Image (tube, rainbow, N blue to C red):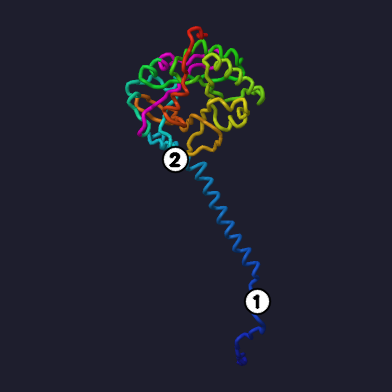
Amino acid sequence: MSTQKKRKIGRPKRRKGKPKKRNHHQGIRHTLSQILGALLVLGVAYIIFIYIVSPFTLRWKALYGMTEFPEGYSIRGIDISHHQGEINWEKLSQATMGKEPISFIFIKGTEGTSLLDDNFNDNFYQAREHGFLRGVYHFFLPDKSAKEQAEFFLRQVHLEEGDLPPVLDIEIDGGLSDEQLRKAALTWLKIVGDHYGVKPIIYANYKFKLRYLNTKEFEDYPYWIAHYYVLNLSYKGKWRFWQHTDCGRLEGISGKVDFNIYNGSMYDLRQLTIERIEEGDLY
């Protein structure tokens, strides 16, 4: 049998020379990328919370009778139509919104040139009988004559002294251009406003208002803004009323109802009402 000489295994030789230094700029870039990554994650989380989680939470709470009210506004009210069905006015007159009483009620009156809300007459009468400040709104259809819509509203709705100004509820453009829609809205506002001697209220969501109704002609009209599921408004202009949820719950109303707040005191709200109607002013 042949034998093989064993090789001695030695330690590997160390390479001579200085160890490489880490590039200073690479370290800074690495740190900055980590910071930017963290900021991006926080930014995405913030957006998700503000635009998804928070609105969902506010809506969910409202559906279960736990509505959160914007802070600093004690004058509260609702708006109603046939969608609320038959209302128990005795219970509603004793209901509270948070810890505050219901101060005002807006009632749907008309739509377009021929539709009177099914529950308008009863709602209009009962609201005054039970001590609420009341107002009436018209749902505007841009594809119908603005003049005819104003005349129809005045034939069907007879506001009285102490009522809130009439409301133009404008939510759709109906295929009109910006200028055409503005002209139509101003036609309705002027006819109805001249009849009652007050500036009618404009109801619209804030994006619609900014696009179509943000010119100087509309500056003097009280604005009722619709902006749901937030506790602070994005709109920076002047406003009087804020419809902040469409999922409110109240004793006396079996389903959901819109909740609103007034931007001012009770004295201010009463100053907004119709002061006097001449006998010859009936349309």
Residue 38 location (% of width, % of height): 55, 56
Q: Which residues are magenta?
A: 99-124
User: Is 191 left, or right, of 126 in this rendering?
Assistant: right
Disc 2: CA contacts within 10 A as few (<14), some (14-19) or many (>=20): some
Q: Residue at x 54, y 32 (%)?
A: 238
Q: Residue at x 63, y 84 (%)?
A: 14
Q: Which residue is mark 2?
A: 57
Position of residue 238 in the picture relative to residue 160 (left or right): right
The quadrant in which residue 39 appears is: bottom right
Characterize the local packing of mark 1: few (<14), some (14-19) or many (20 or more) Cα atoms within 10 angstroms. few
The quadrant in which residue 121 appears is top left
Q: Between disc 2 and disc 1, whose residue precedes?
A: 1
Residue under circle 1?
Answer: 20
Label 2 to label 1, Cα distance in Å? 55 Å
Residue 102 spot, x, y in % from top left: 38, 27
Give left or right: position of 116 versus 185.
Answer: left
